[in-house]
């Protein structure tokens, strides 16, 4: 399992937090540990989930990934 903190651009409120959490939660093999305005902390199986999968989910929610660590 891989832990990652994602910096997310464009988030300004609780609705943003819920949108990002919802989209990330849809990825099989990924657990959302925490989402705050501007970042998300996740744990995922890096043999089945890629950084691109995570990035697509954030974009689908309407935001941008500014950094993945």
Image (cartoon, rainbow, N blue to C red):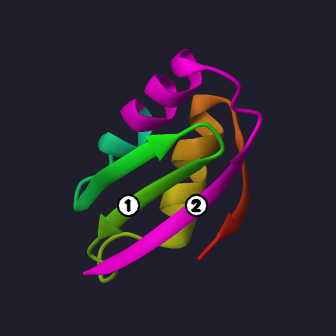
- Tell me: 59 left or right of 28: right
Q: Position of residue 59 (x, y in %)?
A: 65, 41
Q: Position of residue 20 (x, y in %)?
A: 50, 35
Pointer 2 residue: 6
Give the image quarter of residue 55: bottom right
Which disc is residue 9 wearing? none
- Tell me: 24 left or right of 11: left
- Tell me: 26 left or right of 57: left
Q: Hey, which residue is sitting farthest top in the picture? A: 15
Secondary structure at numbered mark 2: strand
What residue lies at 62% left-to-right and 20% top-to-bottom?
13
What residue lies at 52% left-to-right and 66% top-to-bottom?
5
Using the image as rendered, state which of residue 33 and residue 64 is in the foreground. 33
What residue lies at 24% left-to-right and 54% top-to-bottom?
28
Q: Which residues are magenta?
A: 1-22
Where 57 falls versus 16 (above or below)? Answer: below
Tag 2–tag 1 contact (CB < 8 Å): yes
Q: What is the C-alpha distance between the residues marked 2 and 1? A: 8 Å
44 in the magenta segment? no
Where 25 falls versus 47 (above or below)? Answer: above
Q: Mark 2 or mark 1: name the one nearer the start of the chain.
A: 2
Classed neighbour count for the residue bearing mark 1: other residues with Cα under 10 Å, few (<14), some (14–19), many (≥20): many
Secondary structure at numbered mark 1: strand
Give the image quarter of residue 52: bottom right
In this figure, what is the number of numbered marks?
Answer: 2
Specify the quadrant that holds the C terminus: bottom right
Q: Position of residue 15 (x, y in %)?
A: 53, 16
Q: Position of residue 38 (x, y in %)?
A: 66, 44
Specify the quadrant that holds the N terminus: bottom left
Pointer 1 residue: 42
10 in the magenta segment? yes
């Amino acid at each position: 399992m891989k832990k990652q903190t994602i910096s997310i651009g464009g988030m300004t409120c609780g609705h943003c937090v819920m949108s990002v959490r919802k989209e990330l939660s849809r990825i099989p093999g990924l657990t959302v540990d925490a989402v705050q305005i501007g970042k998300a902390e996740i744990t995922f199986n890096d043999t089945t989930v890629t950084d691109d999968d995570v990035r697509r989910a954030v974009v689908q929610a309407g935001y941008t990934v500014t950094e993945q660590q």
